[in-house]
Amino acid sequence: MSLRVEVLYFAALRDAAGIASEHVDTGATDLSALYVEAQARHALPFAQKQLRVAVDGVFAGWNDPVLSGSTVAFIPPVSGG
């Protein structure tokens, strides 16, 4: 079954993907698998353990299910000084 979600990329992930967001059709059953798909599609530089994930504006776990119509944000570590 294919689900349609919006994926948001922030900071270095946005730079690597070359886009800030995209709508994708996915067969991923959890957020971890969704990131694997995005990482393969855009050669994203971060391992999953380095990121946070949020669904519809709320932090989520990597094993949480992908829900059709959701907005999923992949958030890399923030650098600053």
Image (cartoon, rainbow, N blue to C red):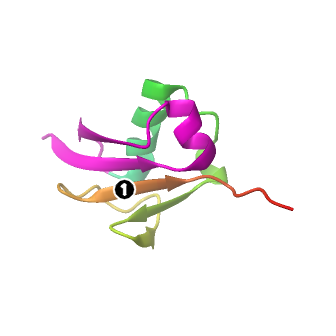
Q: Is residue 56 shown left or right of residue 42?
A: left
Amino acid, disc 1? Val
x, y percent for residue 47? 63, 42
Q: Is residue 78 left or right of residue 1?
A: right
In the depicted view, which residue is nearer to us: 77 or 34?
77
Which residue matches tag 1? 72
Quadrant of the image containing the N terminus: top left
35 relative to 46 in the view: left or right? left
Q: Is residue 44 magenta?
A: no
Residue in the picture at 49% in, 30% down: 18
Q: Is residue 78 above or below residue 34?
A: below
Label 1 packing within 10 angstroms: few (<14), some (14-19), many (20+): many
**What residue appears at the point 50 percent right and 32 percent down from the top-left corner?**
17
Q: Single out the residue that lies furthest toward the right.
A: 81
Residue at the spot 35% in from the left edge and 47% down from the top edge = 7
Is residue 70 shown left or right of residue 8? left
Secondary structure at badge 1 equals strand
Q: Is residue 27 visible?
A: no
Work out whether 4 lies above or below 56: above
Asked whether 51 or 18 is in front, the reply is 18
Q: Quadrant of residue 69?
A: bottom left
Q: Residue at x 39, y 52 (%)?
A: 31
Q: Position of residue 25 (x, y in %)?
A: 21, 37
- Which region shows up in magenta? 1-29
Query: Is residue 73 visible to the viewer in this orientation of the structure?
Result: yes
The C terminus - image quarter: bottom right
How many marks overall?
1
In the rendered image, the residue lying farthest to the left is 1
Q: Position of residue 13 (x, y in %)?
A: 56, 41
Rendered image quadrant of residue 70: bottom left
